Image (tube, rainbow, N blue to C red):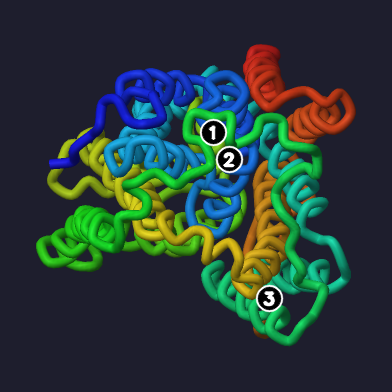
Amino acid sequence: MVKVNSVPTHGVTFGEATRVWARIAALSFGGPAGQIAVMHRILVEEKRWLGERRFLHALNYCMLLPGPEAQQLAIYIGWLMHGVAGGLVAGLLFVLPGFVAIMGLSILYALLGGVGVVAALFFGLKAAVLAIVVQAVVRVGKRSLRNRVMLGIAAAAFVAIFLFHAPFPLIILIAGLIGFLGARAGSTAFAVGGHGSGQEDLFDDAQSALGVETPAHATSGWRGPLAASAALLVLWLGPVIALLLALGPDNVFSQIAVFFSKMAVVTFGGAYAVLAYVAQEAVDTYGWLKPGEMLDGLGMAETTPGPLIIVTQFVGFLGAFRSPGGLPPLAAGALGGVLTTWVTFAPCFLWIFLGAPFVEKLREAKALNAALAAISAAVVGVILNLAVWFGLHVMFRDVRAVSVGPLTLDLPNLASVDVAAVGLSLVAAFAIFRLQMGVIPVLLGCAALGVATHLAGLV
């Protein structure tokens, strides 16, 4: 049983912390950048639980990890405030609203996705999502491609995945190795700065509720972190092993458990980068869903609270819904969605509880940070591949894979261009890049335009 000190030395009670984390979870729209901004505003500026430097210290560590950095930041700060119980509450609440919303939308999509108005709504969302992914390429590129070496890594990653369909984990591994060896060789191309803005601290650690000292539970040795990590490891991989033994490797639930468990340890670079990997496998390898449906799922995730990677729940839902075995399709879909969410997010708690007590050593490891920098550069190429892949399937009704020697190209039939989709995508791009509109207004506006084009008989 996890014990919680209801009145810790920093004065923030467990009940108060739970209420604050529930509030953050309800406001966690807009992807990791928006979610991290919400946490900073509430935890640093409003509640003053921790100072600016400590917040960035935690963020730096979470940026080193696979998985959704915003959720891991919530787990880290929850753990810092109230130990393992605090981390569990913060992390679970962060995911819960998105899980409930995506489950409801997945059921609606499975039952009514082919109905005219509903299909038109998602048609509009696809156009907006395409523009949002292009925006992600630009944003990540500005941050990561600081020199020609990084630009070359990004270009190589794009060529590897777009032309040769190289596995995403392999690209990440090679990029990280290049960065690590480059730093060990003394190359300045891989030098890493902090994640801060360069401004003076807005709020000093010494004035915060936590102060500058490390809490007692964070310095109590190996026993606590190892015990929590061992329990989480069993809870994460236990169901995976049980499904493999009971149903065999070819069953859809076994495939979902294994694939998304593997994804959970290679998801560097955020949701957009991971989607290229998920799309490649879920569409081409497993046949769980169609290319356009990946865009539908991302549209759902963009308009609901929680981590964007919750879109994987939609993928698992459709995969099980369409191969239910002896179960009713909706029940199978719901189980597939729950299983996907579990194996995707359970490892996030493991990384924090095991590594957070030793974060200072990790943060000061220059070679490790250089590996992350190279991975971030490769992620730009991966996201660019995602943008091109999405663009082809949004703007053309007929896209076919053509093999030329070792190369595999997705080539569109130019006669199958979807004029309405192109028009909506241009509108979305104009709203984002020229008018600087936010993600939610663009998504809602394009969804409305999609319905309007349907009612006008244009789609």
- SS for tag 2? helix
Distance Cα–Cα, label 1 vs label 2? 7 Å
Percent of width and height locating residue 418:
73, 38
Q: Given contact means CB atoms under 8 Å apart, are the residues at marks 1 and 2 in contact?
A: yes
Identify the residue shown where x is 53% and y is 42%: 212
Q: Residue 230: in sight, yes or no?
A: yes
Q: Tell me the number on the disc at residue 55.
A: 2
Q: Amino acid at mark 1?
A: Leu
310 relative position to 121: left or right: left
Identify the residue shown where x is 56% and y is 67%: 168
Q: Going from the N terminus, do you reach mark 1 or mark 2 first?
A: 1
Q: Which residue is mark 3?
A: 179
- The quarter of the picture where the N terminus appears is top left
Determine crowd level at label 1: few under 14, some 14-19, many 20+ residues with C-alpha closer than 10 A.
many
- Vertical relation: 280 (above or below) 177: above
Percent of width and height locating residue 363:
58, 61
Q: Which residue is mark 1?
A: 50
- Vertical relation: 247 (above or below) 196: below
- Vertical relation: 399 (above or below) 456: below
